[in-house]
Image: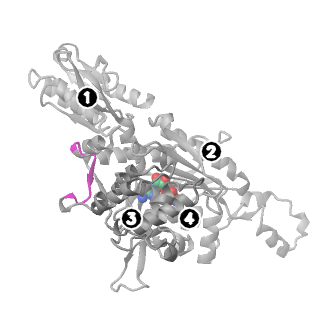
């Protein structure tokens, strides 16, 4: 599937627009149009319904306890010190000494593989054998190179660079330089003074060393912009849940295990926002912090990993594009026992990319907030203590207090965190739905069509109501049906143009069903229901349309 076609459809039909487009846009920010906002809302509603209000039964068939919160975006900055974001939430960045371009250190070689000058230069040598043809490289440096990579050492000082390279190639004929080393030679002018350099993907100049670049977006509260008034736009919704753990516990009758969920905006000053909405600077998360007994934490980790993968499949993501990937020892955070990324194979990448992370976070967050706030965030097993045999303490209150203050009665819960991106899943749903096929027009001639095969629960518009012609009482019947259905669902009334064209307009925005009111409706009070995917048309009594929609939405 071609991303450009999807991006164009999303703009044309009002799913996604560039933010502040009339002013040239702003990198990393997006707006959802009339259909996009419905699609994303349906995704968030489905998540809330399936994870918070009606989660699947637990590993032993028991009911799961889940509640929600909606916390402020700006919180006390101490939250972000405790969570570790102020100190460590940063990407290693390298700056070009000549053009000032920044590139993420861990993505440099990916960026070079895609850049124009590198793709041109690579035609002039043989990276596998290390074979170099100096006159050819010289010609490139003095021609195309000057235009494409004016600051590359090979372009600025070709004779010196080529002599260093020839010495290296001839000196170790059995171990020719690989593509990376060769590229570094092309970027190095003063080998003895600097060692091998890495080039800028934009202009070819040597890049500086990697330095941390914070992803936290800052603002200020109050009248003065000082260090004291500095605040952060939250980079994740999770911390709002952790700092409210005690509030939720004290204001409800919840007992462990239970989960707290939140949907909300998060902000990250991503250096290279890219791939449409995939990596944005403002996005929405759907996060759960599931608090449980430490000894049961692996069981809950496995439960949430499987539940979350199953949810994507249930909503129409094909299993061959969906991959749960357990992070390796080196990747996983130091406090985490295990993390699984649920990934989706987007059309813009050869490798599946993260939709959601399911992390076993141990007691890291509660412990951090307990230390930094000085507030007790431990959990007390009241029922266990009430049932405990206390004879061993011989009525000694001090001993009892001591016993109560530790395991198995008091402890910090462990946390399993399924953290999903609402915008990432919206993008995956759009990619998955985009289909080009053929459908017959009114004359039965097959025509190309674009159809968005959304799962009916997610489709922005659930049904279209179409009077075949604008006369003979058909519009009146159609209007009545429309009014009935719109009390329950987002439905659309369309009486403009040939019926085939109206069907195709609905196919392109993924409306699962079209109800057509025609001549026969006037006689027997039936309508046709046309299915977007199978193109099958059936007649059903008009009085049963609502029930039929309810049935189909339940069974899909
Ligand atoms: N509380 C854990 C946490 O925030 P994360 O892996 O950094 O973990 C969770 O983010 C999810 O949020 C990701 O799996 C992704 O779906 C979404 N996300 C993260 N950064 C994003 C960005 N720049 N643009 C869009 N979505 C993003």
Callout 2: SS: helix
3 vs 2, front mark: 3
Quickly name the residue at label 2.
303
Say which residue label 1 marks.
449
Q: Are marks 3 and 4 in contact (CB under 8 Å)?
A: no
Q: Which residues are magenta?
A: 12-21
The reply to whether discs 4 and 1 touch (Cβ–Cβ < 8 Å) is no
Question: x%, y% of residue 154?
Answer: 38, 64
Q: Nearer the viewer, mark 4 or mark 1?
A: 1
Q: Earlier in the sequence, mark 4 or mark 2?
A: 4
| N-term mark: 1 or 2 | 2
Which of the pair 169/212 is nearer the observer? 169
Q: Nearer the viewer, residue 554 or 178?
A: 178
Mark 4 sits on what residue?
242
Instruction: Name the mark nearer the viewer: 4 or 2.
Output: 2
Q: Is residue 16 above or below residue 496?
A: below
Split into 4 quadrants, where in the image is the N terminus?
top left
Instruction: Look at the numbered disc 4 and say if its residue's Cβ is closer than 8 Å to ligand 1.
Output: no
Separation (CA) of disc 4 from disc 1 = 49 Å
**Label 3: which residue?**
154
Q: Is residue 389 left or right of residue 232?
A: right
Question: Residue 104, percent across and down?
Answer: 45, 64
Q: In the rendered structure, does residue 546 fall within the stretch colored magenta?
A: no
- 254 vs 536, left or right, is right
């Amino acid at each position: 599937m071609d991303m450009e076609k999807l991006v164009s459809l999303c703009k044309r039909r009002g799913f996604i627009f560039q933010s502040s487009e009339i002013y040239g846009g702003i990198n990393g920010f997006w707006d959802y149009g009339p259909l996009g906002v419905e699609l994303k809302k349906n995704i968030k509603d489905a998540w809330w319904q399936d994870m918070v209000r009606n989660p699947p039964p637990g590993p032993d068939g028991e009911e799961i306890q889940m509640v929600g919160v909606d916390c402020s975006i700006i919180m006390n900055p101490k939250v972000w010190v405790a969570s570790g974001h102020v100190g460590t939430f940063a990407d290693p960045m390298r700056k070009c000494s000549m053009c000032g371009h920044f590139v993420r250190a861990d993505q440099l070689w990916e960026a070079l593989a895609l850049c124009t000058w590198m793709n041109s230069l690579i035609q002039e040598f043989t990276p596998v054998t290390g074979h170099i043809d100096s006159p050819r490289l010289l010609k490139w440096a003095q021609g195309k190179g000057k235009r494409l990579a004016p600051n590359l050492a090979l372009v600025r000082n070709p004779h010196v660079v080529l002599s260093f390279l020839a010495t290296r190639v001839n000196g170790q004929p059995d171990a020719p330089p690989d593509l990376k080393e060769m590229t570094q030679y092309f970027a190095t002018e003063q080998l003895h003074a600097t060692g091998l350099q890495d080039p800028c993907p934009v202009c070819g100049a040597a890049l500086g060393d990697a330095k941390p670049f914070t992803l936290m977006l800052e603002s200020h509260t109050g009248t003065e912009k000082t260090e004291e008034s500095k605040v952060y736009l939250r980079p994740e919704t999770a911390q709002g849940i952790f700092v409210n753990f005690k509030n939720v516990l004290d204001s409800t009758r919840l007992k462990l295990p239970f989960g707290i969920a939140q949907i909300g905006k998060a902000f990250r000053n991503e250096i290279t926002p890219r791939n449409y909405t995939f990596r944005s600077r403002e996005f929405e998360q759907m996060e759960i912090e599931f608090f449980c007994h430490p000894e049961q934490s692996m069981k809950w980790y496995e439960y949430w990993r499987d539940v979350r993968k199953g949810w994507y499949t249930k909503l129409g993501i094909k299993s061959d594009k969906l991959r749960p990937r357990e992070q390796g020892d080196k990747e996983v955070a130091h406090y985490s026992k295990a993390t699984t990324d649920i990934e989706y194979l987007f059309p813009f990448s050869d490798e599946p990319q993260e939709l959601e992370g399911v992390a076993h976070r141990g007691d890291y967050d509660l412990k951090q907030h307990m230390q930094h706030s000085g507030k007790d965030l431990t959990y007390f097993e009241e029922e266990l203590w009430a049932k405990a045999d206390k004879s061993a303490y011989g009525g000694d209150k001090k001993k009892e207090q001591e016993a109560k203050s530790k395991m198995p009665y008091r402890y910090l819960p462990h946390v399993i965190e399924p953290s999903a991106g609402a915008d990432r899943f919206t993008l995956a749903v759009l990619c998955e739905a985009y289909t080009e096929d053929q459908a017959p027009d009114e004359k039965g001639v097959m025509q190309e069509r674009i159809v968005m095969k959304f799962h009916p629960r997610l489709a922005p518009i659930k049904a279209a109501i179409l009077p075949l012609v604008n006369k003979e009482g058909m519009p009146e019947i159609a209007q009545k049906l429309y009014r009935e259905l719109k009390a329950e669902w987002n439905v659309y009334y369309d009486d403009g143009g040939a019926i085939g064209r109206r069907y195709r307009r609905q196919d392109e925005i993924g409306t699962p069903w079209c109800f057509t009111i025609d001549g026969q409706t006037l006689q027997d009070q039936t309508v046709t229901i046309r299915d977007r995917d199978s193109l099958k048309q059936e007649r059903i009594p008009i009085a049963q349309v609502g029930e039929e929609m309810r049935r189909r939405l339940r069974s899909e």
